[in-house]
Amino acid sequence: MDVAELRQAYDELLAEIDAGGFGPPPEGQLSAEQIVAHLAANDELMSEATEAVLAGSPFAYYDLDTIHRP
C-alpha cells in the first residue's frame, strides 16, 4: 500500500499545527485545538478498527460517545 500522499498530507498538517498562530474560531465553530483533538481521536479509532478487522473481530467505528468525547 502506497501511503506517500497520506504521509505528505499529515506532514503538511503537522507543519501548520507547529506554526500555530490560530485566531479564535467563528462563533459556534471548533477551535484549532478542538479540530486537532478530533483528528487525533479519529486516527486512534481508525487504528483500533483496523486492528479489530485484521483480527477478525467486529468493530463499530462510528461510536458517537467516543468520537465526541470532550
Image (spheres, rainbow, N blue to C red):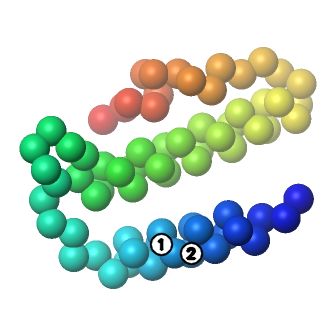
Q: Is residue 31 left or right of residue 26?
A: right
Q: Is residue 12 left or right of residue 50?
A: left
Q: Position of residue 38 (x, y in %)?
A: 41, 45
Q: Position of residue 65 (x, y in %)?
A: 43, 22
Query: Marks 2 and 1: in contact by CB < 8 Å?
Result: yes
In the rendered view, tell whether residue 43 sits above or below residue 6.
Answer: above
- The one nearer the camera, 6 or 57, is 6
Q: Quadrant of residue 56?
A: top right
Amino acid residing under circle 1: Leu
Residue at image point 79% right, 38% down = 51
Q: Is residue 26 left or right of residue 54?
A: left
Residue at image point 53% right, 21% down = 63
- Circle 2 packing at 10 Å, graded few (<14), some (14-19), many (20+), is few
Q: Is residue 19 left or right of residue 26?
A: right
Residue at image point 49% right, 43% down = 41
In the rendered view, tell whether residue 7 sits above or below residue 46.
Answer: below
Amino acid residing under circle 2: Asp
Q: Dot 2 lies on which element?
A: helix
Q: Quadrant of the C terminus?
A: top left
- The one nearer the camera, 55 or 29, is 29
Q: Position of residue 19 (x, y in %)?
A: 33, 81
Q: Which residue is mark 1?
A: 14
